[in-house]
Amino acid sequence: MKILFMVLPSFNRFKTRIGQVPFVAIPYGILSMITYCKDMAEFKIIDCDLDYDNYLNILKKELSEFKPDVIGISLMFDVSYSHLPVIMNTIKEYDTTTHIILGGVGASANYKELLLENKDIEAICYGEGEKPLKDFILTGKFNKSWATRDNLCPEKDLLLDLDDTVNMDFSYIDLTAYENSISESYSPDMHGKDGKKQFYLITSRGCPFSCCFCYNSLNPDKRIRYASVDSIINRVDFLVEEYGMNVLTFYDDQILFNRERALELFNRLEKYGLRVELTNGISPAYLNDDIALAMRKAGVDSLHLALESGSHEILKLMKKPVNLNKLKDTMNMLRKYNFFISVFIVIGIPGETDKHREESEKYIREIDPDIVMVKVASPTYGSKLRQDCIEKGYIKNTKFGELDFLEAVIETPECSSEYLKEYTMYMNWYFNFVNNRRMRIGDYKAARHYFEHTAKKYPHELFAEYFAIKANEKLGIIDGPRMNSLKEKMTDDYKGYFNYFGVNI
């Protein structure tokens, strides 16, 4: 059997691509399935985000040369759905007998609608794909873990032992392409594009929580499954020796939930001298002094804390297990080990008012993180938040693929989506630029690094440009031409924003 996997682009093809930067990530789910089944079939992968202007031509070439029997399409994001019809039409123009199957978080969350709207989809993998794919290859049939028109109540078939999934076979992808496309998580100590050899591990699956905005919020199975620390360290040995890895990125959602395991893992990582990233927001509830010290020694220099709100009432609405009183002590402990700290904040949960947002602002000032990463609440498919928003009429368009998770779309009696968008920009400008912690404490090099990084990543963000100039001035670097260029770029809107914050230019 020949199986061609496709990773759909991570943006909506019917919208302008201004601001729609492809979300490139190593397709670890697909690689895990291939590794689990690699002696049973031939596999190839097309990642559309790597070459999103040419992916249809690449598909046609593989259809002609590889001649796959099965095409498995990975649908991770709602907004990717717009690419599916043209891809399926291209496949069927080549060979009407080619089997088309789907998988991924987005597909699992909406399998009934997808099957109803797309007659050429034969089956959708519900949940993890390793065991269902293996069974399909062996039998040629779709078992109970596949949603089909004859089985609209699929059951997940999960791997309990994750040791084998750690050892992904990278020979099926061009590692150089990913290395050039994926950036490290922001930190003043990041290596930069030319100095990193970055690799990725997922060492646990599952989550015990039910945060309302998460896909996992309606999942009754709250187990967490782990790869053993021995298997992880063996993999690190291999990646360091074979590829010269110097940046290790963990994609785990709950890497600290088992504290004993986490402590052992970070203690054993210390000897490698790596930079270690934890890209997802970690729950501050599981941080303690021993783990913080072990992480710092292992090479973790920055932490993203999943705070989400500084209001007790909103945390209850979110079902977010954060103790705001305890977090203040945790922040002091993390400062002791000189972590660069960012906090995640979600704005616009139904029921949130200006009073709650003011509480969040006050709390953020008290704990004083280095960066505040603010986003509007998104009614993700499969989440409790989406279910509630539909029932109460807070979102107008509920069609799959039409809601951009980066946009404000929730309209409540308390506030409009436009207000939420403006408020999110305000918080970003105030905490990350106007009142930047590193500038306030005189760490101008770290502040400049963040401002320059942001200005390069978002060329139209004039606050980043302005404060990069000001940080350079603090370091004795005066750049008149750059300031003049900034003044020429200044629009009336930005002049108003700068004036609002009392920033004179």
Image (cartoon, rainbow, N blue to C red):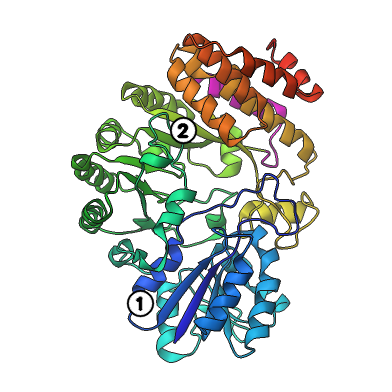
Pick whichever, 474 or 425, lies toward us: 474
Q: Is residue 293 above or below residue 124?
A: above
Q: Main secondary structure of the magenta part?
A: helix
Q: How far across and down, in percent of the image, does residue 5 sit? A: 51, 73
Q: Secondary structure at mark 2?
A: loop
The amino acid at mark 1 is Lys
Q: How far across and down, in percent of the image, does residue 133 sit? A: 44, 79
Q: Is residue 345 above or below residue 197?
A: above
Query: Going by the image, does 141 lie left or right of 81?
Result: left
- Binning the other alpha carbons within 10 Å of mark 1 as few (below 14), some (14 to 19) or many (20 upward) gives some
User: Who comes first in sequence, dot 1 or dot 2?
Assistant: 1
Q: How far across and down, in percent of the image, does residue 385 sit? A: 65, 51
Q: How far across and down, in percent of the image, does residue 204 sit? A: 36, 56
Question: Which is closer to the viewer, label 1 or label 2?
Answer: 1
Can residue 337 be seen in the rendering of this structure?
yes
Question: In the picture, which quadrant includes the C terminus?
Answer: top right
Q: Is residue 49 above or below residue 484?
A: below
Pick whichever, 347 or 339, lies toward us: 339
Q: Is residue 3 above or below residue 376?
A: below
Residue hosting label 2: 323
Magenta residues (range):
348-366
| Residue located 25% across and 52% down the image | 236
Residue 353 among those drawn in magenta: yes
The amino acid at mark 2 is Asn
Residue 229 among those drawn in magenta: no
Q: Secondary structure at mark 1?
A: loop
| Residue located 69% across and 82% down the image | 119
Residue hosting label 1: 38
Pick whichever, 419 or 168, lies toward us: 168
- Residue 381 sits in quarter: bottom right
Question: In the picture, which quadrant includes the N terminus?
Answer: bottom left
